[in-house]
Amino acid sequence: MGEIKQLPKRSEVSEELTWDLSSIFKSDAEFDTSYEELEATLIEVSSLKGKLSEGPSQLLKTLQKMDDVSAKFEDLYVYSHLKNDQDTANATYQAMHAKASSLAAQLNEAFSWFEPELLELSDEEIWAYFDQEEGLAIYRHSIEELLSSRPHILSAKEESLLASAGELFGASSTTFSVLNNADFKFPVVKDEEGNSVQLTHGSYGQLLESTDFSVREASFKGLYSVYQQFQHTLASTLSANVKVHNYKASVRHYGSAREAALSANHIPESVHDTLIQVVDKHLPLLHRYVGLRKELLGVEKLHMYDMYTPILGEAPIRYSYEEAVEKALEALQPLGEEYMTVVKEAFSERWIDVVENQGKRSGAYSSGAYNTKPFILMNWHDSLDQLYTLVHEMGHSVHSYFTRSNQPYVYGDYSIFLAEIASTTNENLLTEYLLKTETNPEVRAYVLNRYLDGFKGTIFRQTQFAEFEHFIHEEDAKGVPLTSDYLNEYYADLNSRYYGPAVEKDEEIAVEWSRIPHFYYNYYVYQYSTGFSAATALAEGILTGSEEKLENYLAYLKAGNSDYPIEVMKKAGVDMTDGAYIEKAMAVFDSRLIEFEELVKTLDKK
């Protein structure tokens, strides 16, 4: 037998392939010193309580102190979590991260008095402070945001009651999580070689990609047999969670749970409605793509468990990390010199932790704080997918870099609503680059199929989820009991409407709602679809070579939280209250589907 290849220990990884965290703290000892200093500073923050009525200089002093303390805490937290993630088995960094996480709770407690105390002042008093104190000017938008929530903030006693009930409000979500991640035991199935495989959430996704029909079917039926068995319990947990959303929206005087959820980022409800309406109108595009999948798989009946198996086999191209860096630099060129300067800095100054090592956290992400580099974690293996992951995370990091370089601390972050747009724009630019430079029809077909699958899984599937989520909140608000039978019937019809006549109506898919954790997140999923659509429109504009469109895009990257997300996107050239940006995305999907349809005919003749 050949020797089994072992992952390297952290100490064995080449330094140039690791991130350089010394720009945050030169040593762990420096971290400890900063931690102790910050703990002591929290006493100063608490001592500011009860003094906002003393005048504008006191308000400015308080805001500046809170910013300073928060920024220093973020440095500690980011350093500890990056150190912990690079080797989760390292006890020193486990303890360090636990300390930083504990400090977060102390910070929240130290700041908890500020908003209620500020809101004891009238709007007139607060804006008079701004007229009298020039230094308050940069805080105007953040205070406007806070004051706009005044109609939905209750009395101090009522707010205290709601806050103390937080654990109770989250009980159904916690119960679902425990059931789903700890208690549910899924059956053992056979893989393609006939080996017994324990079905888990992780293995399920891999098994559905199997080229063996029987493996996919057994995995699908095996997984859903558990959810079917517990569907009544899961309907109860989901129903209770929806009731919490509706109750909290009601007591805070919102018209609906959706209005309450979207108001956090000042997103008009029309954005959500428009997304569902435009996607519903274009479902025939998804039906066409699904029909093509059925044809290419050569199956008499297409099932929901056939949606993830590759229809073109293994990727005909792969990249080493060094090759991927070169491809990324070429693909992102349309973003201009200012953008590319930051990308080159990321590669040359060790923002990226590249390779997998023993104990390293899985997956990939971009993370950082206002005063740190926007670091990237990867677990590199040579593939096309990893190239896409690299440009995706680079999109997040450059977005963070520009935001922090152009905004004061108070606006030095951005909402989830905006976050995925920058990363997905980069993916779109990479797709366009590969389609322009790759002449091999097999490679082009693979790239097109990857894009079409991503579109299917993000815009169509996440909008399906958004439509279901809105339905259950509306039905509960009407007093309709959310029983498993009721949810199953609606979800089965919804799934059939989305995927069309080419797909069999598998009875198991009716309970898919019971395994989706995002339905406990409170109007979160629609942002995947809006973000992907906006990125498609923005990439199209950038690729025209228009200097104005590029400048508008860079302005979005630099805006942070200095304005409401909808306004930031309008300045970037995308009005997300209007369905035109989704229509543009659908047009791109259509054109790439046409090319894919033609390409596979050519490949079939070879």
Image: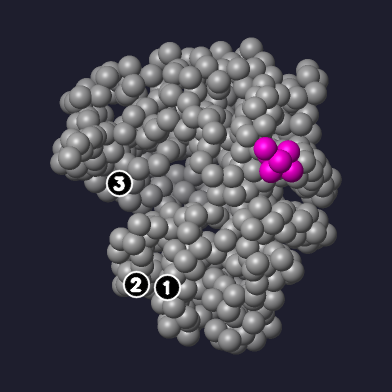
The boundaries of the magenta stretch are: 601-606
Q: Residue furthest left?
A: 91
Mark 2: secondary structure: loop
Label of residue 335 in the image: none
Q: Residue drawn at (42%, 30%), measured in percent from left and top?
A: 382
Residue shown at 51% from the left, 41% from the top? 314
Q: Earlier in the sequence, mark 2 or mark 1?
A: 2
Tell me if residue 605 is in the magenta stretch.
Answer: yes
Q: Position of residue 402 (x, y in %)?
A: 57, 24
Closer mark to the observer between disc 2 and disc 3: 2
- Inspect the image, locate mark 3, and give the three-letter code of the amino acid beneath it: Ser
Residue 24 in percent (x, y) is at 33, 24
Query: Which of the two labelled residues, at mark 1 and mark 3, occupies the earlier sequence position?
Result: 3
- Residue 309: x and y in percent read 54, 54
**Which picture quadrant has residue 490?**
bottom right
- Number of other residues with Cα within 10 Å of mark 1, as a class: few under 14, some 14 to 19, many 20 or more: some
104 relative position to 228: left or right = left
Residue 51 in sight from this viewpoint? yes
Q: Is residue 137 among what the camera can see?
A: no
**Disc 2: which residue:** 187
